[in-house]
Image (cartoon, coloured by chain):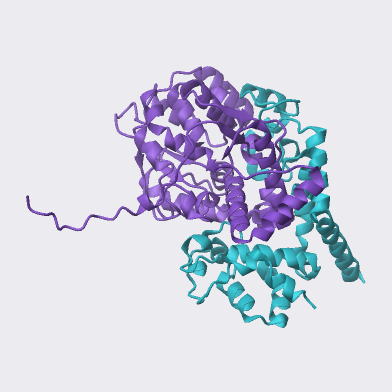
Amino acid sequence: MEANNEPKKRIYWREYVKDIPKNDYFYFRSCIRQTFFPGAEQMFLKILKNNLNINYKDDPNLTTCTGIGYHSDIIPLETVHTMVARHFSLMNESGYSNFVSSCVTTFGVMTEALEMWHEFPETLEKTRENLYKTTGRTFEPPKAIAHASDIIYLYRNEIANQLKYRLINQYTGEPLKVVDHVGCHYSKIFPQHGIGGAEFPKVLSEMVKAWGGEIIDYPERRHCCGFGFRQYFIKESRGYSLTHSQTKFESMEPYHPDFIITNCPGCNMFMDRWQYVIQETTGKTYSEDDNGIPVLTYEEIAALLLGYDPIEIGLFMHQTNVLPLLEKLGIDFDKEQFIAMRAESMQLQPQM
Amino acid sequence: MIPIEEIYSDPRIVENLNACINCGVCTALCPAADYYDYEPRYIERVVLSHDPVALEELMSSDYIWYCGQCMSCKARCPRKNAPGVVVSALRYWSQKTGLFAKSKMGRNQVLIKQSIGQNIYDLGYCVHPSKLTKEAHPEQGPVWEWIFNNREKAYSLVNANIDKEGAGPMRKISDDAVNEIHSILKGTGALDLWETIENSVKETSINNKK
């Protein structure tokens, strides 16, 4: 047989694939996710339990990681490290060792702490000393750390086998066109800790492909949603946040996305709410039906396709109406109840 | 005088100045550079200069408050530097030394302390639904106004556990856990930092009125 001397094509994203723990997750909730899309976190846990038969611990003694405070510069480095250590201490007490966070900033803060403790061992010693001095606790770092989207990515094919619906437009039979938005702190701080790294967004796009959809590759795909931490929290600089979301909407609009899928609690909220602000201030919407582009988290999409109820998922908590997407997917649900809730929240008369 | 030795031994500074060649990749992709007249490579250049006068000037200016902390700079820097992390360190030292109060954007830190800081201290969350009023957050739209006014109903529909004991989304954080947070904030310098932020802004306000 003749030797094949053709050079193999290098598949760059495969250089950014990490080991993801398979079971026994110590789950860490997100301040922003719990506030704006609490149903998404509940759905993640339901899917673990009901669909994947996976063990997890949901510990009420956990608190904020203070990551938002750290990136808004009111929480010193030693403080955030000690808070991270407290959460690891609670994980140690529970007997778990695989830490899974809902928030990408928690994920970023924790991977950064672990890297810094490795590079500067004196910071680890100082953290141990601070934790013991302030709480009497001791801790050991986790064996593995993952973002919750890593877990759904890992089990995307098992989920695909259980889907009640697929990402197919029921009116045309075509795959839905999906924009993926990966939160900056998932893979930009430490690309080796994110599936596909910072340049090859794979964690969400592989889910979408496994569930029947088609990914849109648009110019500003990797651009930040614009949160900006202090830029958003301080009203006078909030335009920073709006501007960057708008940059993304303008860039994705020509590709006619059916929806946006995100893995970051903040990005999901901003891309949902800023569409409302743009519509209110300029009349502009980014979808042909003038609804705007629905923005859903990966947990919400997984739950929806698995047949969970849209209200229990919390889709009524979105400002940009999700109803057109539910109809395209052919979801069987109590449409009247959904429309009535939508009308109540929008202070409108229901139109069936 | 700024504490030069302490600033240059901050691990965030130490690990992010690796042979920076000021190529400007960080600036080309920086969202803050899109929005403000801002260049993260300028931050690196000043810090690399080890010029205490230039560094103090930088730490007293609006310039260090433009970054949005997305860390896009880290992902594409050919030397794996993160000007955004250097900014975190400079902002800390600017507040610690009171220099931040010379900058209008810096003085806004008092608003972050009074919102996010207070939430952490009082509730154990950075963000909490009860604190997001329509007046402060008009961009949240009618859906949020409805959720805000119907919190019990909205959160129970998704099996959240708002302000109640036990596990689940938006559960009440127990007094024991909140006390541990207080102890950590106190023992690791956060409360001292908050006091400096409040006092420096108050002092600047009094001096400006004179």
Note whether residue A20 is visible. Answer: yes
In-image side of B184 versus A25 (left or right)? right
Query: Is residue A315 shown above or below A20?
Result: above
Residue A310 x, y percent position in the rendering:
52, 24
Residue drawn at the location 72% of the way across and 53% of the way down: A127
Q: Which chain is cyan?
A: B
Residue drawn at the location 45% of the way across and 54% of the way down: A198
In-image side of A293 versus B169 (left or right)? left
Q: Of all residues shown, which one is farthest toward the left?
A: A1
Q: Quadrant of residue A34?
A: top right
Q: Of all residues shown, which one is farthest toward the right?
A: B210
Given residues A340 and A179, the one toward you in this image is: A179
Query: Is residue A184 shown above or below B29?
Result: above
In-image side of B87 versus A173 (left or right)? right
Residue A122 x, y percent position in the rendering:
68, 60
Q: Quadrant of residue B53?
A: bottom right
Note whether residue A293 is visible. Answer: no
Given residues A150 and A132, the one toward you in this image is: A132
Count the labels in the image. 0
Given residues A62 and A264, the one toward you in this image is: A62
Residue B161 x, y percent position in the rendering:
69, 26
Q: Which chain is purple?
A: A
Query: Is residue B108 shown above or below A340?
Result: below
